[in-house]
Image (cartoon, grey):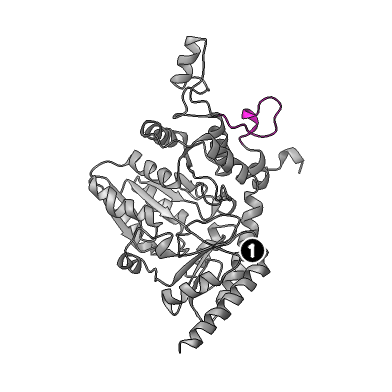
Amino acid sequence: MLVNERKTGVGTKTVWAGEKEVLVHHATQVPVIVSVAYNYDDMDEWYDVAIGNKPGHIYGRNTNPTVQAFEDKLKVLEGAEDATSFTTGMAAISNTLYTFLKPGDRVVSIKDTYGGTNKIFTEFLPKIGVDVALCATGDHESIEAEVAKGCTILYLETPTNPTVKITDIERMAKAGHQTGALVVVDNTFATPILQHPLDLGADLVLHSATKFLGGHADALGGIVCGAKMLVRQIYHYREINGASLDPWSAYLLLRGMKTLKLRVLQQTKSAMALAKYLKTQPAVDHVYYPGLESHLHHDIATKQMEGYGAMLSFSLKDGMEAVKTLLPALKFAHRAANLGAVETTYGPARTTSHVECSAEERKAMGIPDGLIRISVGIEDTEDLIDDLTQAFEKLEHCQSMTR
């Protein structure tokens, strides 16, 4: 096969896609353009740009060259026609839902979505008269049954946060399209390196860009990708409601994405090793990781993902008291409410992914108080395992002193 006939690899796309059109003055990096407005001497050209008949920029709340480069890169990585960005991942989720939903509409989703997303389903959408049906995650038959009753949006998150449950995107997309539903997938945990929801039948794919895309825990952002006809509607909602991504954050996200493939591959390798290690620990009650054959939907993850991801969680037999001893003992870890960064980050669900939910709500979702989420960083795998080993030794010592 000739070189020019070979499909460009995803690692190359993370470096080059979406950038050349924005480079100026022979620079090799995308500039941070902070101008709020853009000048036009030709009134007709100004009008054509303003109404979208000609490419260009008018006002910073609508579009920005640095932000556009970020959007274009994600558009290429997700294989989408178009993309639009937001101030945060939750803005991407909420703007997408509110663009297409009105009173009397119905949404079908799963119970294990991120806590903020769950709050939209259980608190905010019902207030405007949108009916929401939340199904047991992984119970594909129940989801199909609810979708068959009719819905406007079928919303999926896979792998889920924090118990990394898996939903069959291709199967659910077929079910959604049979009833005319719009199928939306949160791809934050998998990233475009490991999973391509649009290829599996989804209509829209979104990310909290704050996480793995940026990868350095220094910029907030969100993005949604899909067919131009759909994305333009979301863009219009966003430009009027104002949740626009700022150019400096877009620059930081762009810079982080250049190493996305390298980071995710190392993080995924270490996550598998940590999952296997945790399975051997007497203090651990359960390990949640789709790469383990014991995972309920390991076969689905193997089918639709190109790796099992950098996220895993585990629960401790002695609950929160054990968490309070184990986590402070770790040396190579942030104890923080974030994920996807180059540094390994640990945190219980009650103060991270589902802090907005009550203990009863978390219990109903199958999230015990002793559950710890790990976002695996790019450190050497052996160091992360050694760190856990010494932390478990301290936990065992403390528990033996209280017996």
Identity of the residue drawn at 66% across and 38% down = 16
Instruction: Look at the image and say whether residue 137 sits in the magenta stretch.
Output: no
Residue 330, percent from left and from top: 57, 69
Residue stretch rendered in magenta on the structure: 18-33
Q: What residue does disc 1 label?
A: 269
Q: Position of residue 113 (x, y in %)?
A: 40, 57
State left or right for residue 162 relative to residue 77: left
Dominant SS in magenta: loop
Instruction: Give the amino acid at mark 1.
Output: Lys
Query: In the image, is residue 102 above or below residue 363?
Result: above
Q: Toward the viewer: 306 or 276? A: 276
**Tag 1's secondary structure?**
helix
Residue 125 in the image, given as x and y percentages of width and height: 28, 48
- Which quarter of the image is occupied by the C terminus? bottom left
Q: Residue 138: in sight, yes or no?
A: no
Give the quarter of the image for residue 271. bottom right
Residue 257 image-quadrant placement: top right
Badge 1 local density, few (<14 within 10 Å), some, or many (20+)?
some
* Rendered residue at 25%/50% (across/down): 126
